[in-house]
Amino acid sequence: MVHASPASAKTALRLVLRRRRKVLAAEAPDAALRVAALAPDHLFSARIVAGYRPQGGELDPWPLLRRLAQAGAQIVLPRADARDAPLVFHRHADAETLAPDAFGVPAPLNTAPVLAPDLILVPLLAFDAAGGRMGQGAGCYDRTLAAARSSGAVHVVGLAYAGQEVAQVPAEPHDQLLDAILTETGYRAFQRNI
């Protein structure tokens, strides 16, 4: 019997999960507002919060980001300056201009101040009960989270629809785990075996 590698299993699964996420987004148009309302109090102590510009049915972080900004957090957005490098987080205010980065995603200009977040909100295609996260496949967030964690304390929270949970995300050695997940049904922290 031949077993698929985690990389090939992820590629096949991503096709299914992208379709599922679009259906979930259409079925729950108020999910982002519910996520913002369900955010636990400890997230509001973050000083610098990294968000993202939603693409392809990703859960919209902006209702939550606005609440965090009202609580005093500075908001930063990722910018990919190279397709194989960690993302760089630049300060962002609602009215500031965005321009396509190396992946074509709207991002702050590279002249905006670079700040290191203590809370990173990440998009995803799927998550599991162990904190496994499947992204789009470019490895941007895995490289970024590894670099951020090596530089100091950072809390990583996935934002997703509850229906994006799978039994197990196929894992590879470089994959970074989530510290918690926040969906339209609630917040769940993941335990780490240390």
Image: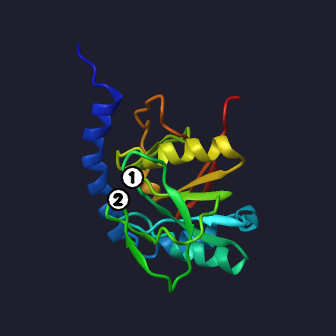
Element class at badge 1: loop
* Label 2–label 1 contact, CB within 8 A: yes
x and y, in percent, of residue 107 in the image: 43, 69
- Left or right of 55 on screen, residue 153: right
User: Residue 36 appears in which quarter of the rendering?
Assistant: bottom right
Residue at the (56%, 46%) spot, across then down: 145
Q: Which residue is mark 1?
A: 82
- Whole-number angstrom distance, CA of label 2 to CA of label 1: 6 Å
The correct choice, above or below, for 33 with respect to 181 in the image is: below
Q: Which residue is mark 2?
A: 102
x and y, in percent, of residue 26 in the image: 32, 70
- Crowding at label 1, few (<14), some or many (≥20) Cα neighbours within 10 Å? few
Nearer to us in this view, 89 or 67: 89
The correct choice, above or below, for 5 with respect to 122 in the image is: above
The correct choice, above or below, for 160 with respect to 14 in the image is: below
- Residue flagged by tag 1: what amino acid is it? Ala
Instruction: Name the N-terminal-most of marks 2 and 1.
Output: 1
- Residue flagged by tag 2: what amino acid is it? Ala
| Quadrant where the N terminus is found in the figure | top left
